[in-house]
Image (cartoon, rainbow, N blue to C red):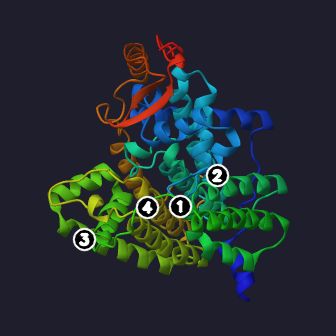
Amino acid sequence: MTLRRSLQEWLFPAPPRGRSTLGGGEYALVLVALLVLAVVLQILRVGPSSALDALWAEDGQVFLQGALSGGFWDTVFSTYAGYLVLVPRLIGEAGAAVPLRDAPAAVAICSAIVVALSGLAVWHASAAHIRNPYLRGTLVGLTVLVPVGNLESVASGAYVPWYMLFATFWLLLWRPPSTRAASLGGLFVLLTGLSTPGVWFFAPVAALRAVAARGRRDLILLGSWAAGAFVQVPVILFNEEETVAPLWSSDIWTVYIQRVLDGGSFGERAAGAAWQVLGWPFLIALIAALAVGLAIGLRRSNPTGRYLAAIAIPTSLGMFVFSIYQRAVGPQMIWPDGDSFGDGGRYVIVPALLLVSVALVLVDQSPGRRIASGRLPWVAAAATVVLLGGLATSFYVGNPEGRGQPPWGTALEDAGAACNAEHSPEGRIATSPPGWVVVVPCDQLPSGSAPSAAR
């Protein structure tokens, strides 16, 4: 069998053929209901007041501020941190399109919708690799409610590209059933590429997809990936924004074990508790258990699982190590003895989900264990229980003092009062965390008024 045929059959297999029992209208209704549920659950993770009545970090000071201050086209294609961030910019535009009082709710809801759509993409794109709906549903649940992300990356427009990256990985493995589906998938991939250069880490998948390309549908996905990936190249090369100087630290390897292997297996909270109590003996035992499980899974799996493991595991490691090095956060993310935290969780999302994907594919593709529907074999059931248990224990990430203070309504009133007291043309609206602000004209604030010319 040639490499091309092997890739077509095993790495990019056709999705299972099954007839849906739902009509078009029924399917749309179920789909909308699930998307709404996904949005609500994300809001609940942070806490409704913190998510809907407060702005978090870049969501306010960078993206909403940019939308309020500049023209649409100039703003949405403005860079941040040295590269294009199109989707976060569009979310900022959504916040600016509603009354100022409702901006936080618009930003949080739009962010949650993008994450929910990422989960939907994973559900469809992974169908050929994970045929058991319970296992696939587990992966989707972990995508939308990722248990390693912590409060910084939940219902936050600044960090939705991480969720989109994971969905893009699966879309590059997907065989679309129609040109329309391929176009929608291609649009998602393109938007991801225009929002983060992280799509570069999927170059090996894209190259193999090019080798195995069958026709127009495959080329739509490949072209979308290439367009997004290559547009970022000149943007980064000629960008003059001040960025963080990269910093190498040997802590990165420890952080990968703690945050990706441990956190990806049990969720950030349970993983952190195990580290605090058991320390390195627990991590060593976990590494050994995962290595044995991987060896058994690879031996029992068909080539689909082996192909995926050969791609996803190095991608997970490479993406994490390079990202942590590039952003110089290795020393800040390591868990010291007897302590754990979720800071920097956004860097863990995709690497951890890639490893979980490998585990679920190996379980699903093992001979005698792949069941398209019906009951779960005990191995699959055990994996599902462990992963969903980690999700449950790490579901709530709210910290009202850290994210949620001051409430947006109160901050608007305080800024308006300051405008009147100081006769300033602009008001500074405080956001979370402390020190972040949004600056708007005083005449847009409650009780605020711009100073007259006589002043």
- The tag on residue 97 is none
Q: Taking 236 as reference, is 389 left or right?
A: left
* Of callouts 4 and 3, the N-terminal one: 3
What's the residue type where badge 2 is placed?
A: Ala
Which residue of the protein is positioned furthest toward the front in this rendering? Answer: 454
Neighbourhood count class around disc 2 (C-alpha, 10 Å): few under 14, some 14–19, many 20 upward: many
Identify whether 97 is placed above or below 137.
above
In the image, what residue type sits under mark 1? Glu
Identify the element where label 3 is drawn: helix
Disc 2 is placed on an element classified as helix
**Up-down: is 149 above or below 196?**
above
* Residue under pointer 3: 285
Identify the residue under disc 2: 121
Quickly name the residue at label 1.
240
On the image, the x and y values in percent for residue 50 come to: 40, 29
Q: Disc 4 residue type?
A: Ala
N-terminal of the two: label 1 or label 4? 1
User: Residue placed at 72% from the left, 55% from the top?
Assistant: 185
Marks 1 and 2, how far apart in space?
35 Å
Tell which circle, 2 or 4, labels the residue nearer the N-terminal end. 2
**Tag 2–tag 3 contact (CB < 8 Å):** no
